[in-house]
């Protein structure tokens, strides 16, 4: 048999997973992984606060795909070949056990991303993957038989089959070398970012979280529910991050200047909450309103609501007026904040945009434009909400591409 030469561009999760499986499935093959920086698996290292959120315990593919604002339709095909169960089993066979947390996120039982890094590095070494750092590819030329890759220092690399796993990038110019190949790039914009709410007293509650809130963004026609975290710059937490993902392109169009409405008690209607307050007025008549918080809310958040509604510290429930009831209900069910700007953590950024999905065959991850060229991971116009879904996209697309190479 003639030896096949495979090159993978990108030393992240998708690149490593593709390279490892391609080398293991194709014994008579040379697999080389090129990384433009001096660091490998950087997102794996910092994911989940350094614990690595490997995947999510969502085992129904039809439900799993609903966690991808972009790529839902295409991932149906991909997940039918390699899904969450397969990810768990792949790592288990290599001595890495995963555990599930209450919100569905899955981590190594060691609670250390180094466990995942060690596993991938060891597997790459065992499979014979050649890893080259500080190789920044600037140009790719395709002949009838192979690809020629030229790096920033003028070095050339040749391969029969090429996999691009270069990750997402919020800078459009980073895709120029791919556009020159004839592929269409959907304009990249950030996804999974937090909201900046400057000059607002709510930021004084930094570190306080609401167990469940509903976030509405009229400009994006969005309603998202989930835990919400107040920060010193504004708001974060799963509800905000999910809203940023689903509204990524619309919010970019507003230049991150928009209004959000928050229901801190989404299970309540105006009428139901009004009845609750009438009951409190009778049953808690002698109690101070500010120090008696009958809802499942943090104490400091309740105090903030009462202050915002004009309730003084000595007011008792018996003194509750209709005017204050209306004010409290409006704050708790329709609290409005003006967002001006976002905060994106550079190492953790996720991009909405990338290679146009119509140009990819998702049975193989091969380009429909250029034979023997494959794309995997976030370089595609696919991104998931927070919770391990972006890594699952990396593992699954990488596996499908590796299978196709064999």
Image: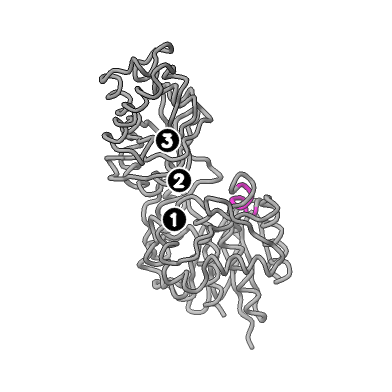
Q: Quadrant of residue 284?
A: top left
The residue located at (29%, 30%) in the rendering is 274
| Left or right of residue 126: residue 343 | left
Residue beneath disc 1? 383
Query: Which numbered circle lies on residue 195?
Result: 3
Q: Determine contact: label 2, label 1, CB under 8 Å.
A: yes
Query: Which numbered circle lies on residue 164?
Result: none
Magenta segment, principal secondary structure?
helix
Q: CA distance from mark 2 to mark 1?
A: 9 Å
Total number of numbered labels? 3
Q: Secondary structure at mark 1?
A: loop
The residue located at (41%, 57%) in the rendering is 68
Query: Which numbered circle lies on residue 192?
Result: 2
Q: CA distance from mark 3 to mark 2?
A: 10 Å
Inspect this view and state whether residue 304 appears: yes
The residue located at (35%, 17%) in the rendering is 318
Q: Is residue 403 above or below residue 214?
A: below
Inspect this view and state whether residue 338 appears: no
Image coordinates for residue 297, horizontal then vertical, percent: 46, 32
């Amino acid at each position: 048999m003639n030896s096949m030469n495979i090159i993978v561009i990108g030393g992240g999760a998708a690149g490593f997973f593709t390279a490892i499986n391609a080398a293991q499935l194709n014994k008579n093959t040379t697999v080389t992984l090129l990384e433009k920086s001096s660091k490998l698996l950087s997102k794996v290292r910092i994911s989940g606060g350094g614990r690595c959120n490997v995947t999510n315990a969502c085992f129904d593919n039809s439900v799993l795909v609903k966690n991808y604002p972009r790529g839902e339709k295409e991932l149906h095909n991909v997940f039918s070949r390699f899904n969450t169960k397969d990810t768990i089993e792949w790592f288990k066979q290599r001595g890495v056990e995963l555990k599930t947390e209450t919100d569905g996120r899955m981590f190594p039982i060691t609670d250390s991303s180094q466990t995942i890094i060690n596993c991938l590095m060891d597997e790459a070494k065992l499979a014979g993957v050649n890893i080259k750092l500080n190789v920044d590819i600037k140009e790719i030329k395709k002949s009838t038989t192979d690809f020629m890759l030229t790096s920033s220092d003028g070095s050339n690399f040749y391969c029969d089959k090429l996999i691009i796993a270069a990750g997402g990038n919020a800078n459009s110019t980073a895709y120029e070398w791919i556009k020159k190949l004839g592929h269409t790039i959907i304009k990249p914009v950030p996804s999974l970012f937090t909201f900046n709410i400057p000059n607002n007293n709510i930021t004084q509650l930094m570190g306080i979280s609401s167990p469940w809130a509903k976030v509405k963004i009229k400009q994006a026609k969005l309603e998202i529910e989930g835990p919400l975290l107040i920060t010193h710059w504004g708001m974060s937490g799963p509800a905000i991050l999910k809203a940023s993902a689903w509204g990524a392109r619309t919010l970019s169009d507003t230049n991150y200047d928009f209004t959000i409405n928050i229901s801190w008690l989404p299970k309540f209607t105006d009428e139901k909450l009004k009845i609750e307050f009438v009951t409190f007025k009778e049953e808690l008549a002698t109690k101070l309103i500010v120090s008696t918080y009958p809802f499942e809310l943090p104490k400091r958040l309740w105090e903030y609501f009462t202050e915002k509604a004009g309730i003084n510290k000595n007011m008792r429930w018996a003194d509750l007026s209709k005017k204050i009831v209306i004010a409290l209900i409006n704050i708790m069910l329709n609290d409005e904040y003006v967002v001006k700007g976002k905060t994106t953590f550079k190492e953790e950024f996720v991009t909405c945009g990338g290679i146009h999905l119509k140009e990819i065959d998702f049975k193989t991850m091969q380009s429909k434009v250029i034979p023997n060229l494959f794309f995997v991971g976030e370089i595609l116009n696919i991104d998931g909400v927070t919770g391990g879904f972006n890594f699952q996209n990396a593992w699954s697309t990488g596996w499908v591409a590796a299978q196709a190479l064999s």
